[in-house]
């Protein structure tokens, strides 16, 4: 029998802190009894929420942490002054082998800085990247970097491609994930020198590199992994989120404009409900801080219970698939 996976949860992180993180953790354990959760945070805050949620189920324990990293706190300050924070202790548990992964909805910069300081990066990785799963026409696609590194070298983009290929391969059971480089055109002559150099590295590697992908083709299922620098990736991601909100806004206006349109909305409700489910960002919550010597998953700070439970599920999958070990193995096999 496989050993139970243990997830350390920063119970104080995020906009709502323990009010979301604790119920989501308990809900997941009750659905998946073989999973173990360590709730890290202020015991006097966590225990009443546990009590009101039916008590502490088997497989869940509380580790006290006296400090909390604020959402707007400078990463360097939290790293220096908050060694007893729920975020820091949760990551320490991964380093010490007591947990297989850490999940936090807290300050992204602080989480990245603390993860890099405590866990270090994998051999051959210069910088960790933020990677997430995004919906496409017929499924989903991984994209990285989504904001950790505003400027990247060609070598670092190549490293992102290796990491993305591993995650897509082991979590989505894809034999040879297709890797695309985000660019301003699909032609070889397009793009800046860094992107062109990255393309040259990928072209002679063992990865399944398919070429440049433009932003309007990200969700066309041409690739399984899209690679870009963090500045470009974050802009692309926020543009997608904004467009989805705009479409939803327009639909609400149209279906409320008069009695006949309201009736049409009732008829179309099953379709709209299905569409909403497919595009629901909560079901894609949980971004991986790939490249660390351990698993750290970043949940959206404004996540609700459903979204935070999804982030824990991402951590479970990566732990079960031993993602950092697989990245290490593929990096050692690559000749750049």
Image (spheres, rainbow, N blue to C red):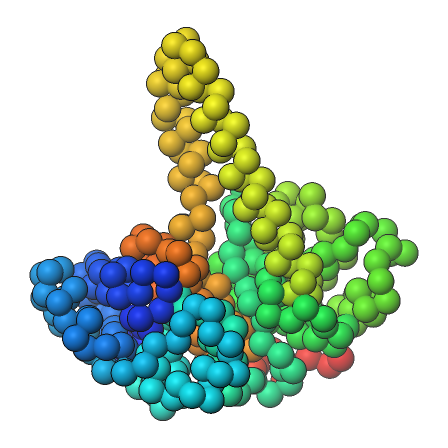
Q: Quadrant of residue 148?
A: bottom right
Residue at 32% over, 81% down? 67
Using the image, determine if residue 278 lies above or below residue 158. above
Residue at 58% over, 40% down? 243
Q: Position of residue 110 (x, y in %)?
A: 48, 76
Q: Position of residue 62 (x, y in %)?
A: 20, 78
**Quick one: which residue is furthest to the right in this view?**
189
How many numbered discs? Answer: 0
Q: Position of residue 70 (x, y in %)?
A: 40, 72
Is 174 on the left or on the right of 98, as rendered?
right
Q: Quadrant of residue 78?
A: bottom left
Residue 293 visible to an observer of this rendering: no
Is 5 on the left or on the right of 237, as rendered?
left
Using the image, determine if residue 192 lies above or below residue 186. below
The quadrant of the rendering that contains the N terminus is bottom left
Residue at 39% over, 76% down? 69
Q: Quadrant of residue 143?
A: bottom right
The quadrant of the rendering that contains the C terminus is bottom right
Q: Position of residue 178 (x, y in %)?
A: 65, 58
Residue 282 visible to an observer of this rendering: yes
């Amino acid at each position: 029998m496989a050993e139970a996976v243990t997830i350390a949860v920063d119970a104080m992180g995020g906009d709502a802190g323990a009010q979301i993180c604790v119920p989501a953790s308990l809900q997941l354990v009750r659905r998946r009894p073989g999973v173990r959760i360590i709730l890290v945070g202020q015991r006097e805050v966590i225990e009443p929420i546990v009590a009101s949620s039916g008590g502490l189920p088997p497989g869940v324990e509380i580790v006290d942490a006296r400090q909390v990293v604020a959402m707007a706190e400078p990463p360097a300050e939290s790293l220096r002054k908050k060694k007893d924070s729920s975020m820091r202790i949760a990551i320490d548990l991964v380093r010490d082998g007591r947990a297989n992964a850490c999940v936090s909805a807290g300050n992204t910069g602080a989480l990245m800085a603390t993860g890099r300081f405590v866990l270090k990066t994998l051999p051959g990785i210069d910088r960790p990247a933020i990677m997430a799963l995004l919906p496409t026409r017929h499924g989903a696609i991984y994209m990285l970097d989504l904001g950790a590194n505003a400027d990247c070298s060609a070598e670092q983009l190549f490293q992102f491609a290796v990491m993305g290929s591993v995650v897509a391969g082991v979590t989505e059971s894809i034999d040879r994930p297709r890797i695309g480089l985000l660019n301003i055109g699909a032609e070889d002559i397009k793009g800046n020198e860094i992107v062109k150099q990255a393309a040259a590295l990928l072209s002679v590697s063992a990865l399944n590199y398919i070429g440049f992908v433009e932003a309007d083709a990200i969700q066309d299922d041409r690739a399984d992994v899209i690679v870009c620098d963090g500045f470009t990736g974050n802009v692309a991601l926020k543009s997608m989120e904004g467009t989805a909100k705009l479409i939803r806004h327009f639909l609400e206006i149209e279906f409320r404009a008069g009695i006949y349109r309201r009736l049409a909305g009732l008829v179309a409700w099953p379709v709209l409900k299905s569409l909403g489910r497919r595009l629901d960002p909560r079901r894609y919550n949980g971004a991986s801080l790939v490249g660390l010597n351990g698993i750290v998953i970043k949940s959206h700070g404004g996540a609700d219970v459903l979204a935070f439970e999804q982030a824990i599920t991402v951590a479970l999958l990566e732990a079960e698939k031993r993602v950092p070990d697989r990245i290490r193995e593929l990096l050692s096999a690559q000749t750049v």
